[in-house]
Image (tube, coloured by chain):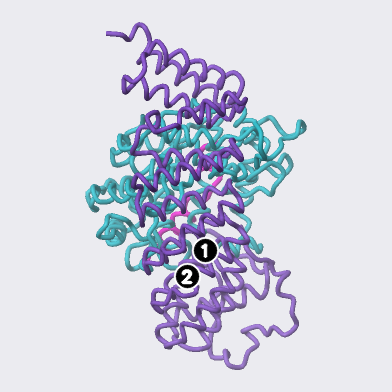
Amino acid sequence: MAGPIKDCVISDSSSNELMLAKHVSYISAYSKKKDDYEYCMTEYLRMSGVYWGLTVMDLMHSLDQMDKDEVLKFVKDCQQECGGISASIGHDPHLLYTLSAIQILTIYDATDTINVNKVVLFISALQQPDGSFCGDKWGEVDTRFSFCAIACLALLKRLDAVNIDKATQFVLSCMNFDGGFGCRPGSETHSGQIYCCVGFLALVGGLHHINADMLGWWLCERQLPSGGLNGRPEKLPDVCYSWWVLASLKIIGKLHWIDKDKLVRFILATQDEETGGFADRPGDMVDPFHTLFGICGLSLLGNKDIKPVNPVFCMPEHIIRRTGIEMDLF
Amino acid sequence: MAESSDDDYTDDSWTFYRDREEWKDVTPVPQDDGPNPVVRIAYSDRFADVYDYFRAMVKKDERSERAFDLTTDAAELNSANYTVWHYRRVLLKDLDKDLNDELVYITEVIHDHPKNYQVWHHRRVIVEWLKDPSNELKFTEEILRDDAKNYHAWEHRQWVLRTFDLWDKELVFTNRLINNDIRNNSAWNQRHYVIANTSTFTDDVVEREVNYTKEIISRAPNNESAWNFLRGVLQDRELSRYPKLMEYCLNMYEHSIRSPYLMALIVDMYVEQMELKDVENSVALPKALQFCSSLASEHDTIRKNYWEYLSRSITCKYGETAKS
C-alpha cells in the first residue's frame, strides 16, 4: 500500500512462544508488591487492578495463587453508604469500579459479600431521562457507563431495575456513519467504545440493530501490516485495542475476518521474556492491564493453554456459564 | 500508568505537610488499601505526605482554604485521582472561590495532562458553572495543535458547540484541520458532526461534500478516513446511482490506483446495482468477484478472509444458482 502507515515493526528475534509461567509469576509478584511508587499512583483504580489480576490468573489456571479472603474483605470495605463501590477505601464510588467489584465477586461466587440491593439502587439512580448513564454523581455521561451499568445488573440478575429500552435507544444514538460507536452522540468512533456498545447490545438482546457487515469491516480495517490492531484510523497498534476489536468481532461473529496468525505473532511479540507480562507494543514496558488483554486476546484466538474467555464480560467463560447468564451472540 | 514521577519534584522549597505549623492539628491518615500488608514507604515521600493529609481532610470533610490548597498539591501529584477533583469541586462551591481563577488553573493542568478524563470533566463543570464558553474553542484548538486526535479535546469541543450554539465557524475549522492532516479521522468526524447539526445533508450540501472529499481522495487514495466520510455523506442515498461516482472510481482504477478502499467501494456499488436491478447480475457479479479476488490475493491480503466471505455471500445471492 502506498502512503505512510503508522505501525510498528516486529523483529525476527522477538518471542514467538507463550511464556505462561512467567506471566503467572509476574502477576503474582505484582499483586504482592505494595510498597512502590507505581502502587501508590494506581490507588485510584485499585479495584480494576484487582479484577485484571484475578481474571488473568484464572485464565492462566492460577487463581489459587491469589488471596481470596483479602480480596473479598477489600471489596466489602469499598462499598459506600450509597451502595456504589469505590476504587479504594475512602475513595468515591463510581460505576467503573462497581463493575470491577461485581466481576471480582462473580469470579469468587460471592456477591453476598456486599449489599446487592444497595448496589442496584446506586446503579439505577445513575440512569438519566434519555436512557444514558452517568459514571457517578458528577454527571459525566459515556457509553462506557451504559455498558458498566448493564454488565453489573446482568451479573446480579437485576436487569429489571433500569429502563432497558431507553438505555438501548441512547446507545444506538451513539452509532456513527461508519457503523461504529463513540462515547456520546456524534463522538468519533473508537474501538473501546465499540466494545462497550456491542457488549451492551449483546446483553440486552439488541445486536440486530447493528449493521454487522459494515461494523465488521471497520473493525477489520484496524489490523495493520504488523498484525496488531489499532483503536482508530491512523493510530498505532496496541494490545489492549487488539482485545477490544477482537472481542467486538467475536460478539458480532466476524472474528474469522482478520488474519489470526499475524495477530497472534503481534501479541506474543509484546511479551517481556525476562520479567513476564505483556506491553502495549513490542519493546515497551509491561503492565497488568496489557497482560490481561494479551492473554484474553490469545484465548479468543484459540490458544489451548489458556481458558476460554467470555468476549462480553472479559471474564473466564466457565464462570459466566456458572452464572447462567444468557447473551445474544452472533 | 503513572502520570508523573517524583523526579519532577526535587525543589528544595517544598515543606512537608507534617512539618507545617498550620497543619499541626491534623492527624494524617495513611493509605489503607485492604489487600495488602502495608509496607511503607519506598515510594515518594512527598506523595505519601500529601495524600496522608488529603485523606485526613476527606475524613473530617473539612471545608477550608488549606484543604483547597492541599487538593492543588494532590492533583499535581496524581491528576487522575478522581476523588481529589470531587473534593475540590465541593470546596470551590463551599468557599465561593473565583471560578475564573479555576478556569486558568485547569487550563494549565490540562496542558500538562491532556489525556485524562478527570481534568476535562472538571473543566466542563467549571464552564457550566460560569455559563461562559468564550475561552473554550480557542483552548481546545490549542490542545488539538499538540495532538490533533485528542479524544477528550474533541469531546469537550462538541459539548461546547452544542451547549452554547457556537457552530458558525466550525466547518471552516474542520477545513483547516483536514488540510493540515488529511488522515485526521477526528477532524473528518467533526465535519460530519457539524453538518448533521447545522445545514444537515441536503442535496446541495451532499454535492459540495462529495466534491470536497473526492478532491482530497485524489491527493491520497489510501486515506481510510476520507473514504469513510464519503460513504457517510452518501449513507441515505444509493452510491451506485450517485451522479459520476462510479465513473470517478473506475477512472481511478484505470489509472492504476489499487487502494483497497477504492476497490471496496466499487464492489459495493456493483452489489448495489444488482440489488436495485439496475444492472444484470451476469454483468455485475463477475466484475464484483474479480475485484474481491484481486483484493484477497494481492491488494488487501491481510483481510483475505473477509473478501472470500464477501465473494461467497454475493455468489450465493446473485449467482447463477440463485436465480429463481
Mark 1 and mark 2 in contact? Answer it, CB < 8 Å: yes
The N terminus of chain B sits in image quarter? bottom right
Which element type, helix, strand or loop, lies under badge 1?
helix
Which element type, helix, strand or loop, lies under badge 2?
helix
**Disc 1 crowd, CA 10 A, few/some/many (<14, 14-19, 20+):** many
Q: Which residue is mark 1?
A: A44
Viewer can see residue A63: no
Q: Which residues are magenta?
A: A55-80
Q: Which residue is mark 2?
A: B83
**Magenta stretch holds residue A76:** yes
Residue A316 is situated, as x and y percent measured from the top left of the image, at 45, 37
Residue B56 is situated, as x and y percent measured from the top left of the image, at 50, 80
Viewer can see residue B166: yes
Q: Residue at x 70, y 69 (%)?
A: B6
Q: Chain of mark 1?
A: A
- Amino acid type at circle 2 is Thr
In the picture provided, is B280 more to the left or to the right than B306? left
The kind of secondary structure the magenta stretch mainly shows is: helix
Quick check: B130 above or below A311?
A: below
Quick check: A249 above or below A200?
A: above
In the rendering, what colour is chain B? purple
Q: Residue at x 46, y 12 (%)?
A: B286
**Magenta stretch holds residue A267:** no
Alpha carbon distance from label 1 to label 2: 8 Å
In the picture provided, is B165 more to the left or to the right than A227? left
Quick check: A323 above or below B89?
A: above
The C terminus of chain B sits in image quarter? top left
Residue A15 is situated, as x and y percent measured from the top left of the image, at 71, 33
Which lettered chain is shown in cyan?
A
